[in-house]
Image (tube, rainbow, N blue to C red):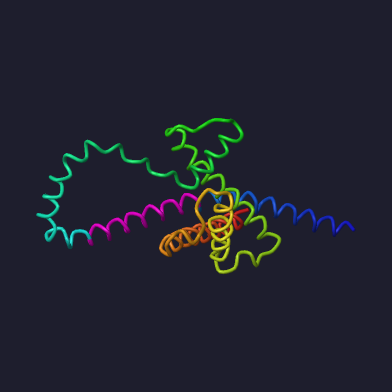
């Protein structure tokens, strides 16, 4: 009986240690995911820029004439529409509106959006590593399946259901590839941090 209690106590201790390691891993993974997305975006813009430059000389004279013809029209047009908020900002705005009846300002959105990203990423990381203490198979393939499930459940499922974005069919394949790759980076990073911290504990 005493041995059983010790085993249960050891298991509970491991779960709490795993949770702590997972929270750190989730935070680091969320940061790494953002850096990956920054690189992806820069590369994508660079590719678009190179493609545009191929036609720049051909259309140079035409563009100059087009700009002159548009000159009188620009002043008559209204201001350009604001860039749509991303999913994390929409989530923060929904919480602020429903709980506090407050509409976030642009400066508040700059803080609230990343806050939602890191809170969600940190929390999911904690749950992942805590679950790994009970079912080690969760960590298979260096966390890549975990990242894929995270993407599928949140990006492809919960976010559209909560009306924070349109349905999956509304976006091109490249957008899904971008999101899935980002979550692969998240899952891999979370697993690397988990292993390092659990060895140290």
Give above or below for 135 relative to 123: below
Tally of numbered tags: 0
Residue occupying the point 58% across, 57% down = 157
Residue lying furthest bottom: 141
Point out residue 81 in the picture as x, y percentages from the top left corner. 35, 41
Residue 57 as seen in the image, left or right of residue 126:
left
Give above or below for 109 relative to 129: above
**Viewer-nearest residue: 34 or 137:** 34
Tell me, yes or no, whether the highlighted magenta stretch contains residue 61.
no
Which image quarter holds the N terminus?
A: bottom right
**Viewer-nearest residue: 173 or 186:** 173
Q: Which residues are magenta?
A: 30-51
Residue occupying the point 41% across, 44% down = 84
Q: Quadrant of residue 177?
A: bottom left
Point out residue 23 in the picture as x, y percentages from the top left corner. 59, 49
Residue 168 as seen in the image, left or right of residue 23:
left
**Viewer-nearest residue: 1 or 30:** 30
Residue occupying the point 51% across, 41% down = 115
Point out residue 41 in the picture as x, y percentages from the top left corner. 35, 55
Tell me, yes or no, whether the highlighted magenta stretch contains residue 35.
yes
Point out residue 56 in the picture as x, y percentages from the top left corner. 15, 58
Q: Main secondary structure of the magenta part?
A: helix
């Amino acid at each position: 009986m005493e041995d059983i209690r010790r085993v249960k106590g050891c298991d509970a201790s491991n779960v709490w240690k795993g949770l702590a390691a997972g929270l750190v891993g989730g935070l680091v993974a969320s940061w790494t995911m953002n850096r990956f997305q920054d690189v992806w975006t820069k590369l994508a813009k660079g590719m678009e820029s190179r493609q545009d430059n191929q036609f720049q000389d051909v259309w140079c004279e035409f563009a100059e004439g087009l700009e002159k013809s548009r000159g009188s029209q620009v002043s008559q047009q209204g201001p350009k529409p604001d860039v749509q908020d991303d999913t994390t900002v929409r989530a923060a705005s929904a919480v602020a509106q429903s709980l506090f009846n407050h509409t976030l300002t642009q400066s508040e959105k700059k803080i609230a959006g990343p806050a939602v990203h890191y809170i969600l990423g940190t929390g999911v990381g904690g749950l992942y590593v805590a679950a790994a203490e009970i079912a080690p198979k969760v960590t298979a393939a260096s966390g890549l399946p975990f990242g894929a499930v995270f993407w599928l459940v949140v990006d492809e499922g919960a976010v559209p259901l909560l009306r924070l974005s349109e349905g999956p069919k509304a976006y091109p394949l490249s957008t899904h590839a971008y999101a899935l790759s980002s979550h692969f980076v998240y899952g891999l990073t979370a697993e690397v941090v988990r292993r390092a911290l659990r060895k140290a504990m």
